[in-house]
Amino acid sequence: MIGEGPLHLHSTRVIPDWVDYNGHLSEAYYVLIFGHATDALLDAVGMDESFRTRTGRSVYTVDARIRYLSEVACGEEVEVRTWIAGADPKRMLVHHAMYRVGQRPGVDMLVAQTELVLLSVGKPGPRAMPFEPLVFDTILRLVERGGTDCPVLPERWIPPGRLSQPASKPHHPTRNREIEHVFENRLSDGRRYRTV
């Protein structure tokens, strides 16, 4: 299973209601499509609707970044490819890449990417808690499945002069420390190492 590449869990066709005044897929619907891919991933790791109902367990998205790379027109089909880039007992770093399915066989074009930090939550609360053991074992297997081909988003653009300003105090110090930990796990060449 190691190095088998991304999961192919969700695809859809762009409908007229999703098209904006510029004539292409509106940014909100990129998020919707990525959200459906995340739902499919949760089903794949064993956190499907029956699991959520039975246990009161789920995930919250606590950090997200999206890159919009190309327009998608009404009627075009897109497929989301998914990697779990890393995980620890309470979180997983998920990378979705959305491709326009090519008109020619084997020619798909990357149109958007997102990285999400998903936090395991449960009751009472909701509060952060470790993934169920069987779920976590599946997550770790999927981390290995992705091998070394999981994309890494480039550094975020920062406006000139912004680097010299003091960092603002985090709104939620504990949550921000947890999120920062996930992103600190990068090697000097940009590859991530996995937190287990």
Image (cartoon, helix red, strand yellow):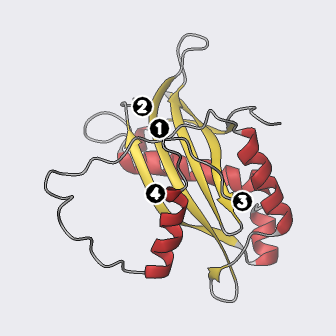
**Looking at the image, which residue is at 25% across and 40% down?**
21
Quadrant in which the C terminus appears: bottom right
Whether residue 72 sits left or right of residue 84 in the image: it is left
Is label 2 in contact with label 4 (beta carbons under 8 Å)?
no
Callout in the foreground (1, 4): 4
Q: Which is more N-terminal, label 3 or label 4? A: 4
**Looking at the image, which residue is at 73% across and 73% down?**
130
Which amino acid, by three-letter code, is at mark 4? Ala
Q: Which is more N-terminal, label 2 or label 3? A: 2
Callout in the foreground (3, 2): 3
Crowding near pointer 4: few (<14 within 10 Å), some, many (20+)?
Answer: few
Please, is residue 121 above or below residue 77 in the view? below
Crowding near pointer 2: few (<14 within 10 Å), some, many (20+)?
Answer: some
Q: Which residue lies furthest to the top in this view?
A: 104
- Can residue 75 be seen from the camera position used here? no
For the residue pair 175 and 161, the one nearer the viewer reads as 161
Task: Indicate the position of residue 17 as horizontal and vertical percent values.
Answer: 41, 44
Q: Which mark is residue 15?
A: 1
Indicate the secondary structure of the residue bearing disc 4: strand
Q: Residue 64 carries which label?
A: 4
Which amino acid, by three-letter code, is at mark 1? Ile
Q: Which is more N-terminal, label 3 or label 1? A: 1
Is label 1 in contact with label 2 (beta carbons under 8 Å)?
yes
